[in-house]
Image: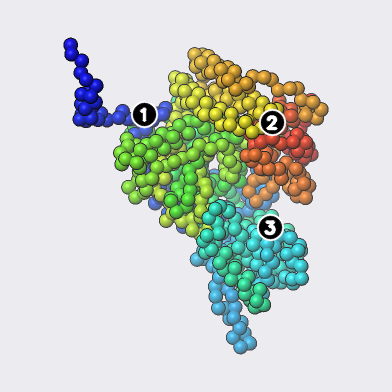
Amino acid sequence: MRSTPLCAIAAAAILMPAPRARAEAPPLLPEPEAAALVQELSGELAKRNLEFLSRQHRMRGSRGYHAAAEFVVERLREYGLSDARIERIPADGEIFYGTQRSRPPWDAEFAELWELAREGDVWVPRTRWASWEAQPLSLAQDSESADVTAELVDVGEGTAAGDYAGKDVAGKLVLAAAQPELVAPLAVERFGAAGIVSYAQNQKTAWWGEDENLIRWGHVGSFPKQPTFAFMVALKTARAFRERLARGETIRMHATVRAGRRPGFYEVVTATIPGADPSLREHEIGLSCHLDHPRPGANDNASGCATILEIARAVSKLVREGKLAPLARTLRFIWPPEIEGTLALLHHRPELQTRLQAVVHLDMVGGGPATKAIFHVTRGPASLPSFVHDVAAAFAEFVNRQTGAFASTGSADYPLVAPEGGKEALLAERVEYTMGSDHEVYNEGSFRIPAIYLNDWPDRYIHTNFDSAANIDPTKLKRAGFIAAASAVILAGLRAEQAGELWSLLEAASLARTATILGRRAGLPAEEALNLTRFHCSYERAQLDSIGRFVHVPEAVGAEAARFYAGLEALVGGSEPAPAPRGEGALVFRRRPEPKGPLAVFGYDYLADRYGPERAQQLGLLGYRGLRGGGSEYAYEVLNFADGRRSAQAIRDAVAATYGPVPLELVLEYLRALESIGVVEPVE
């Protein structure tokens, strides 16, 4: 037979229609179920619900919060979740839920700040600079009632005694750059100021100074020695005030506030889609957010609230229609006040501490292009290794590829685009543990509930009056909803037969993490590099062990994983045991059963209260800055690693591997401080 010339084959290939590329199968989920989720989840419906939530001033225990909670319950019942209800948990300022001192609910009825002008012998209102009715964010949270007419005095930052040198602020209003909570001890309690006007620039990002018209969220303090009030003004307004005062002009203000705290309740909305397997329905997968925030609070965090509400609707409907297989485990949806409400709920409903096997937490998931947001799929802390994070990352990377293909070519099997939303690629980033939301309660060593954290960061408008529904992208809500829903559905239905597919995800993710570790250790001293390698290898082995929390790992999968880990350790040199600890480094500490929870919560610091604020500030670990983390991260993980098995040296080595080398002395000093306030105890 005569051979065909290569040029003829090439020409024929060019002329023939290109075969359609085989569709990429989604990870873990059967393709029909993934397609059903994609089709059913609605970014537009999520945004409609978000628009209602963002019109409520949702401070803990307030009328606005209650209206939002009732709205969520009403929607859930419409969606078929018949057990939806509001859990009411007492909060009066005296009750403790673990490490959280309950904060009394706060509400406001009226607040205005007017500048006065002299007309003859009287002062009359000239310019209204703040109005709670128009912009609730202009009244600092936890302000108390007042009716004050006084001059305005510029005190700079307002947090050091030198800021008040030569200035008489008694009975006057101080203009301060710092948060009212930090200004009040000197301005109000020590020097007798009547109130505060603040332009604090919280949540600084690269864009924080570009828009001078933003009004930012302020806090007076939940447990002040002397009640006071504060108004928040834009940077542009404050700069104008400062210039006028510097010229010697008198600025006279009239402040009226009707607001305050009262005993009441934390309100937490919960609902479930019950599991179908009688032997597993007591096990739960949580989907959580935080419902509280000042108005508008659209991305932070009406976006997370509306997205899990949409997940509840879509999954409930698809299960009823048979488009999703019945879920073996229960899905539980939770809308609490941030951090404090989650901690209160876990104490109010202690059975949830053991029923919840994992949580998918959504806090800021809808930021459109104007927010400059980058979507993150955040792992749990190093102290709690879990495969669940690689499940969420696998879905995020699938969405990245599909939406990237669609943005580039206009064609994809799963573009995940909302009709009223954008068409950009998602570009979700897989990142290591960061703190700042309810996930740190679940992940904390008292509870050890692995929590996936989906979040936007940075956000140009976080904690400002521009965090509005106009900046929310329905496409982003749909994509975040798919990643969260798919992860939760997989975890709720996980079977032993899927262990092999899970292992494939873990193996690939482990290799990627190993590459990162190899890069990090290159810049470390030999001893620290070896410590990092040892810790990394033990962490990776624990990933497989974590599957056993859900299902039995078949022997064949376990054997394959054992061979992989042995090869990994041989490759990177992580099998050499750590040297025996010496001296005080050999001391072993364990977390006491009570109190449960992280030490720095919302509006209250357990360590500072029990140990003393001045002494706490002197703890070297809290002010330490490592290669990849600061004092709060080190402190969080030191406590988590105090498990009664690790020595102080081993705890130090674990946090050093996670955040960068740290002196053992700082870790020991912190553990001794925790021992003195009854949080940890030594183990003989």
- Tally of numbered tags: 3
Give whichever of discs 1 and 2 has the lower sequence position: 1
Q: Residues within 10 Å of mark 3 (few under 14, many from 20)?
A: some
For disc 2, the marked residue is 525
Density class for disc 1 (Cα within 10 Å; few <14, some 14-19, many ≥20) is few
Q: Which residue is mark 3?
A: 182
Task: Give the residue type that dot 1 points to.
Answer: Ala
Marks 2 and 3, how far apart at CA: 40 Å
> What residue do we see at 32% from left, 47% from top?
419
What percent of the width, then of the height, locates residue 617?
A: 75, 48
Asked if marks 1 and 2 touch (Cβ < 8 Å), the reply is no
User: Which badge, 3 or 1, is on the more N-terminal residue?
Assistant: 1
Q: Looking at the image, which residue is at 34% across and 34% down? A: 35
Amino acid type at image mark 3 = Leu
Q: In the rendering, at what x and y percent does residue 11 appear?
A: 21, 27
Q: Amino acid at mark 2?
A: Pro
Label pair 2/3, CB-CB below 8 angstroms: no
Q: Is disc 1 placed on a helix, strand or loop?
A: loop
Indicate which label's residue lies in the foreground, 2 or 3.
Answer: 2
Please state, as top left, top right, bottom left or bottom right, where the N terminus lies in the image: top left
Is residue 62 visible in the rendered structure shown here?
A: no
Task: Give the x, y percent position of residue 155.
Answer: 69, 66
Q: Quadrant of the C terminus?
A: top right
Query: Which residue is label 1 attached to?
Result: 25
598 and 565: which one is in front?
Answer: 565
- Mark 3: which secondary structure? helix
Of discs 3 and 1, which sits in the foreground? 1
| Residue 50, percent from left and from top | 43, 51
